[in-house]
Image (tube, rainbow, N blue to C red):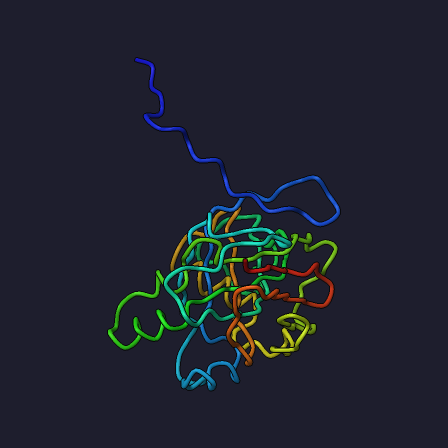
């Protein structure tokens, strides 16, 4: 018996690799919440009170840098969140932190766009964050850089600007849970696989973006993640 798809199979979501015509296929997107102390405090939380927690975005929420996109619907308070993105190249479960770097393919700058008003409503009603975090085009990802070129990215400036105005400024060394610990912890919850992305949390200074504005995330040693809203 010959089998066929009853609908056209969706094309895979892929992101560009810096300095190359190659593409990185995206499997899943995991996001770490409250991973910088000052951001945790600005959101009314205690950074010392809890281990890392995770939420997800669908793979096709990822878009490359440089696009102009429609302003997201159903929000009056769209926020930027500058983040280091970790691209997994080797899967595994129960990974030990000292071995975590062996599982990384590379890194990118990213913007975890958030419908903050919908997130606040979800928190107040104790409902999931999916529609606040996992909407269309909600993960702006810059070109990926192989770890062989970048090194472990344990420190370095991370910034966000809106129309050239500085909004966020921090350093990767300020993460509460470093990248290796994030991978180790997450791999005990799910089996990581090649193509997974991990957005590792944002420094303080998150704020609103308006229609017509351009938002750019920059991390030292990586290509920027930039998006303009129509």
In the rendered image of this protein, does residue 39 appear above or below residue 160?
below
- x then y, percent, for residue 208: 50, 74
Occupied quadrant, residue 66:
bottom right
- x then y, percent, for residue 67: 60, 52
Near-viewer residue (82 or 104): 82
Near-viewer residue (55 or 184): 55
State the residue at coordinates (72%, 68%).
220
Q: Residue furthest top?
A: 1
- x then y, percent, for residue 104: 60, 54
In the rendered image of this protein, does residue 179 appear above or below residue 68?
below
Q: Residue furthest left?
A: 125
Near-viewer residue (185 or 24): 24
Occupied quadrant, residue 102:
bottom right
State the residue at coordinates (68%, 67%).
219
In the rendered image of this protein, does residue 53 appear above or below residue 91?
below
State the residue at coordinates (56%, 57%).
140
Left of 145 or right of it: where is 104?
A: left
- x then y, percent, for residue 109: 62, 62
Q: Quadrant of the N terminus?
A: top left
Q: Quadrant of the C terminus?
A: bottom right
Left of 129 or right of it: where is 164?
A: right
For the image shown, how many numbered marks are present on the structure? 0
């Amino acid at each position: 018996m010959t089998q066929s798809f009853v609908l056209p199979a969706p094309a895979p979501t892929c992101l560009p690799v810096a300095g190359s015509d190659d593409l990185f296929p995206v499997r899943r997107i995991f996001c770490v919440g409250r991973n910088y102390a000052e951001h945790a405090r600005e959101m009314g939380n205690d950074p010392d009170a809890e281990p890392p927690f995770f939420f997800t975005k669908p793979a096709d929420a990822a878009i490359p840098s440089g696009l102009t996109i429609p302003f997201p619907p159903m929000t009056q308070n769209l926020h930027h969140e500058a983040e280091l993105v970790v691209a997994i190249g080797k899967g595994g479960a129960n990974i030990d932190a000292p071995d975590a770097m062996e599982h990384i393919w590379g890194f990118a700058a990213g913007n975890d766009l958030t419908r903050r008003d919908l997130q606040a409503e979800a928190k107040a009603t104790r409902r999931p964050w999916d529609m606040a975090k996992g909407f269309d085009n909600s993960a702006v990802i810059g070109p990926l850089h192989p770890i062989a070129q970048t090194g472990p990215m344990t420190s370095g400036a991370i910034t966000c600007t809106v129309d050239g105005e500085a909004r966020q400024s921090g350093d990767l060394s300020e993460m509460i849970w470093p990248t290796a610990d994030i991978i180790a912890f997450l791999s005990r919850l799910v089996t990581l696989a090649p193509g997974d992305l991990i957005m590792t949390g944002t420094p303080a200074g998150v704020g609103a973006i308006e229609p017509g504005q351009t938002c750019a995330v920059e991390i030292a040693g990586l290509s920027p993640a930039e998006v303009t809203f129509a």
